[in-house]
Image: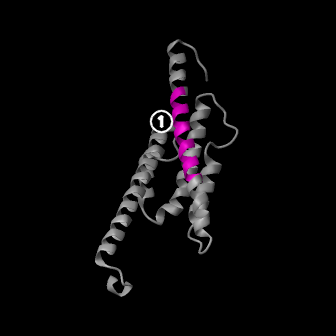
Amino acid sequence: MFDSLGLPSEGIAILLGILAFALAIGLTVTIFYILTLRNCLRQVRPENRRFEPNNTWLLLIPLFSLVYNFFVVKGISESLRNEYEQLGESPTTAPTYQIGLSYAIASCLTWVPMVGSFIGIGAFVLFIIYWVQIHGHKNRIATLQMQYQTNNDNGEHIL
């Protein structure tokens, strides 16, 4: 099969090894990303969730994840907004929604011929920003929940 390309068999083995390594790195990054999304949703109280934490694993399905990402972004954003409101915070906009939606759109546009690779760079940057924002909101909610619990233990009612 590869003989027609004129590549020596050692070169093919090296090429396949590099490809396998790149796939392993990509899968590892994706798993850590999904774990961050899942942990953020688990930090939100069940009554405030608009998306189930374990459903984030569906992002591992190739091509399906391009569409499903829109649902994940919306569900996480609404869940965060509900949690903040219950904790006495009132976000002016839906947390993480704009950057998440931008990332989801850019991910779809990477499939457009000739411009997809340029858009892919932007999608990667948006991916990192979205991931960092989700992690930050998870930590902020955890802090607010601890403060809320402490104030309730002292007999004070914030809400």
Residue 106 vertical position relative to residue 133 in the rendered view, above or below: below
Q: Quadrant of the C terminus?
A: top right
Query: On the image, which quarter does residue 84 sit in?
Result: top right
Residue 26 vertical position relative to residue 130 in the rendered view, above or below: below
Q: Quadrant of residue 109?
A: bottom right
Q: For mark 1, give the secondary structure.
A: helix
Percent x, y of residue 11: 33, 73
Magenta stretch, residue numbers: 126-143
Q: Mark 1: which amino acid? A: Gln
Task: Please give the residue where the numbered disc 1 appears in the rendered image.
Answer: 43
Q: Residue furthest bottom?
A: 4
Q: Is residue 89 left or right of residue 3?
A: right
Residue 138 lies in the magenta-colored region: yes
Residue in the picture at 33% in, 82% down: 2
Residue 54 x/y as whole percent? 41, 48
**Residue at left offset 47%, top offset 64%:** 64
Q: Position of residue 45 (x, y in %)?
A: 49, 35
Q: Residue 48 in the image: x percent, y percent?
A: 53, 38
Q: How is the image coloured?
A: one colour
